[in-house]
Image: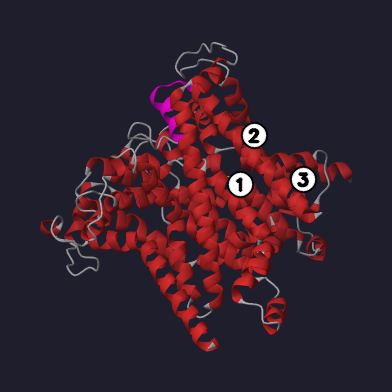
Amino acid sequence: MQTRQTRTAYLLIAPALLLFIGFTAYPFIWSAQISFTSWDGLNAVKKFVGFQNYIQLFQDAEFRQSISVTTIYTVSVTLISTILGFAIALMLQRRKRSSAIYRTIFFSPVVTAPVAAAVVWQLLFDPYVGIIDIGLRALHLPAPNWLSDTRWALPAVIIVGIWKRLGFAVIVYAAGMSSLPVSCFEAADLDGVSGWQKIRYMTIPLMRPVTTLVLITGFIDAIQVFDHIFLLTSGGPIGSTNVMSLFLYNQGFRLFRLGYASAIGWTLFTVILGLTVLQWQIRRRGES
Amino acid sequence: MKSTKKLLIKVADHLTLIVISSVVILPFLWMITTSLKPPKLAFSSPYLIPTHFYWQNFVNAWQEAPFARYYLNSIIVAISVTFGQVFTSALAAYAFDRFEFPFKRSLWFTLLASMMVPLPLLVIPSFQIIQNLHWADNLAALIIPRAWSAFGILLLRQFIHSIPRDFDDAARMDGASTVRVIWSVILPLARPAVATLALFAFLFAWNDFLWPLIVLNTPENFTVPLGIANFSGKYGTRWTLLMAATVSATIPAVIAFLAMQKSLIRGLASGGINE
């Protein structure tokens, strides 16, 4: 009986398991091996170079710039979209009737293809016909050439990142707030607790698990950003938007330095692993 | 006094919401307005709400690039990935919930942990694998590696867990095989979770860019995102044409997803909180 159950179970998980092994586990392990070679993808010979790629990586000024660009991007997009998302969810909670239409609006960027969004934002950021600079000029404010100015390119791609991420934060917070115990808030009302105090001492603490989730998934999502930056700036000007995924792509698929690119990938993975472990720790502490 | 304060908060709420949502929706509006502009107005004074309706832009865009073909490719890929993920996830989720077998816990942990692996890391060796399999520049490369999903197995397992085993047993008494039990008893009962997984899988496959960018070469094989990127590279600042292409390539999909947003949102919210 036991062996029959085992056989059936393995037959059932076989399709998923085989695909997992072939297209996730195997490339994952293989990429670790590649990261210790100086392979160009063409030669059959893969020269073993030990930790050379990793050592070189941390001495590479371009990589250091990439890390700081990725950090600024990830932290700005995640923090701003989380705070804004929380505020919007609060307002939607008070506006029961109109909240459906607002939710649809905030959600549309989430389902829009990042490539299409990037093309549209390219037009919006255009210094001549883009509505952003037309608006700034009308207000007699300086109108930067967003995507080709080293000071403004990163803020520009961060704006697009927030626009795409905001809907997710709104939806998750709105769902979380709808499951809050109404009776506690009614009791607080009777005791004359002000609206701000309710948010400060009730909503924010009660929403802490949701906040952890929105923040950590936000970090993991933003740290891998590729699509819209690839199309808007290709990492430029002068590396000012060269996030890690773009750096990896250029090293791997333009310069064919597969070993070096894999070392970048493993660095990225290590950071994500760290963030995930952090999330588990926080959740465990919350439960105990 | 108190009611004036309440009223003020209400007005402030509405104003803030209107301002933020206008900003969020502005790119869509600007895209549609530009796509309908006659070319001679493209560089003159801007206007936000469409007042001219120059449909010729759409005809021109579709003549300049094979968007019908891109659509077809995207639909083939997205539907295949969706069916693949629902099929493999349903079988695996059922096995993980209903059976005991050796290495069950470590397999489960490994599958879940694999969700942490960043796609850019996998892309380099995966491309080598695809080349060795002679799948480069072939839609199979977009479908087969994506025909499973750790998220899908997790989602369906949670749902299947809430279905009483009595249903399985009753069907088995009638002589149904395990696959039959999954297909005609479990899947219909798990419809909400299946719908959520299907939507996520479709959306992911439909919007994906990095992997098709690496794998595909010839324009006949392009998916919609790759087609738009290619078109944008070619027609850089012919904005009216470019926006017509973008509108026709995205708005139908966006409308379809918004129509199904209830299950999408439910999935996002529940997946997020119960995780």
Mark 1, residue position:
B149
Provide the residue span drawn in magenta.
Answer: A245-258
Residues at marks 3 and 2 on the same chain: yes
Labelled pair 1, 2 in contact (Cβ < 8 Å): no
A110 vs B26, left or right, is right
Label 2 lies in what chain?
A
x, y percent for residue B132: 50, 25
A231 vs B186, left or right, is left
At mark 1, the secondary structure is loop
Q: Nearer the viewer, residue A61 or B151?
A: A61
Residue type indicated by callout 3: Ala
B248 vs A41, left or right, is left
Residues at marks 1 and 2 on the same chain: no
Q: Identify the disc placed on residue A146.
A: none
For disc 1, the neighbor class at 10 Å (few under 14, some 14 to 19, many from 20) is many
Residue depicted at 48% across the width and 48% down the height: A76
At mark 3, the secondary structure is helix
Mark 3, residue position:
A9
x, y percent for residue A121: 32, 51
Numbered marks: total: 3
Above or below, B144 relative to A251? below
Residue depicted at 46% across the width and 57% down the height: A110
Q: Earlier in the sequence, mark 3 or mark 2?
A: 3
x, y percent for residue B199: 53, 58
Residue type indicated by callout 1: Ser
Residue type indicated by callout 2: Ile
Q: Main secondary structure of the magenta part?
A: helix
Q: Nearer the viewer, residue A33 or A163?
A: A163
